[in-house]
Amino acid sequence: MEKQEAKRIGHRLVLVVYPFQGHINPMLQLATILHSKGFSITIAHPQFNSPNHENHPEFHFVSIPDGLSKTNFSPSNFMAAISALNSNCEAPFQQYMEEMMKVEDPHDRVAGVVYDGFMHFAQAVANNLKLPGINVRTSAAATLLLFAVFPDAHRERGYISFPESLARAPVPGLQSLDLKGLLGSTEIPTPILELRATMTDATKKASSIIVNTVHFLEQQTLTKEDTSCISWLEKQAPKSVIYISFGSMVSVDDKELVEIAWGLANSEQPFLWVVRPGSVRGSEWIELLPESFKERVEGRGCIVKWAPQKEVLAHGAVGGYWSHCGWNSTLESVCEGVPMLCRPYFGDQGLSAKYVCSVWKVGLELEGVLERGKIERAIRKLMVETEGVEIRQRAKDLKHKAELCLSENGSTYNALNELAQHILSFG
Ligand code: UDP
């Protein structure tokens, strides 16, 4: 299909991305939508994990020196990454913006800074330059509230506080989900509390907030996508395959790897399993899987390093998704009507799992120690046994609802048009 160039409206938006896949993907999608509404787009990104510029010739890309090589940073330590990115990128970003605004074309003026909530320094730069700052949340909307909930000691800072005795009480506005379940624990480490406080402060100063509640249209990948799994899926019976992927950051240990493998084998369901290189602690890839497992599942199992996930979830052979419940993966699964087996690890994943299992009731949670018998039973319940019939039906119903939201005059469709109008109203 020929790509239609939208009429330019003489306004430029600068989007600041947080350099991890679950954040880069929705931000580039948002940029694509805003570009289609006539905005010119600049993508400001740290040097680390830079998005591929060639995929988006319509955007202008700017690489912000991030100084990460000078800090003790590893991708698994995301707290260190957030803090280093915020302290290191602010000055170079401010300098770039000042220089750009000095020479800007009057027909292409900067209308605002749209930033990932984790890159909260961008709000300070927007304030300094008297530009509107627009805060983007790539997690569920409920995390906005969740991030403002603090133990008693933080009451004086103006946040929602909770005494320990109330930790199991439902939180108003969070659809009867209990606080401890949401937070993972009521003992939240101080650096995480501080990050949440800083992010909430930036959110309060933002002119607008954009929350990613839509099924986005494109994806970036860390490892080369293995599309051979699609031809493997073609050979499987409808709704028979369990797809397993824990996103771009979660890792497991050797014992968990082996329990997952035998749980899959014993479930007797065909499976498509994404094991990212380096995601099994202490090994390169799947060398720790025993030969007896490989022989047992030959032809019935497909293991890849990275899958075209949206295509996989949309495939008729896929009948269940065992997920870490990253928000993007959760949306992708819901939009394709695939019921989920939830195994959250950190961050907002616990919240998403509670939504999936307790609020929308389109999945089952795998709790406690990972053990093959438990895994086998959960897969069979989710995908084949009568106990899972209602879950499977509700997942189909949610897909239908999501389609209505995305179609013309649906709530998502309208919200995107309103967003473009709202940005223009900043004058
Ligand atoms: N993804 C993919 N192929 C894979 C695994 C993941 O394309 O093999 C994509 C997935 O579709 C999603 C993103 O990577 O868009 C992961 O984002 P999410 O928020 O679910 O999890 P995170 O990686 O941030 O933990």
Image (cartoon, rainbow, N blue to C red):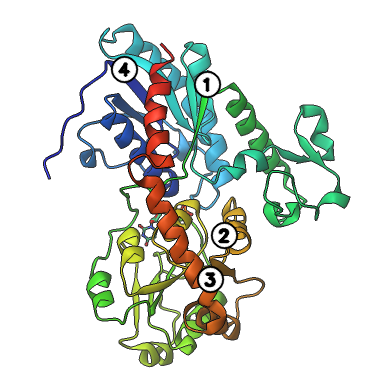
Using the numbered discs, state the Cα–Cα distance from disc 4 to disc 1 in whole angstroms.
17 Å
Q: Residue at x 48, y 72 (%)?
A: 392
Q: Are marks 4 and 1 in contact (CB under 8 Å)?
A: no
Disc 4, ligand 1: is the CB inside 8 Å? no
- Distance, label 4 to label 3, CA atoms, is 46 Å
Instruction: Name the residue rendered at 32%, 50% in the picture.
Output: 219
Residue depth check, mark 1 versus mark 3: number of the one nearer the observer: 3
Amino acid type assigned to the residue bearing label 4 in the image: His
Residue 22: horizontal and vertical position, in percent? Answer: 44, 48
If the image is split into quadrants, where does the C terminus sit?
top left
Residue 7: x, y in percent?
Answer: 20, 23
Would residue 374 be found to the left or right of residue 193 on screen? left
Q: Quadrant of residue 259?
A: bottom right
Which disc number belongs to residue 207? 1
Whether the residue under disc 2 has CB within 8 Å of ligand 1: no
For residue 382, above or below residue 55? below
- What distance separates the C-alpha of mark 3 from that of mark 2? 9 Å
Disc 2 from disc 1: Cα separation: 31 Å
Q: Which mark is residue 360?
A: 2
**Label 4 or label 2, whichever comes before in sequence order:** 4
The mark lying in front, picked from 4 and 3, is 3
Residue under label 4: 11
Query: Between disc 4 and disc 3, whose residue precedes?
Result: 4
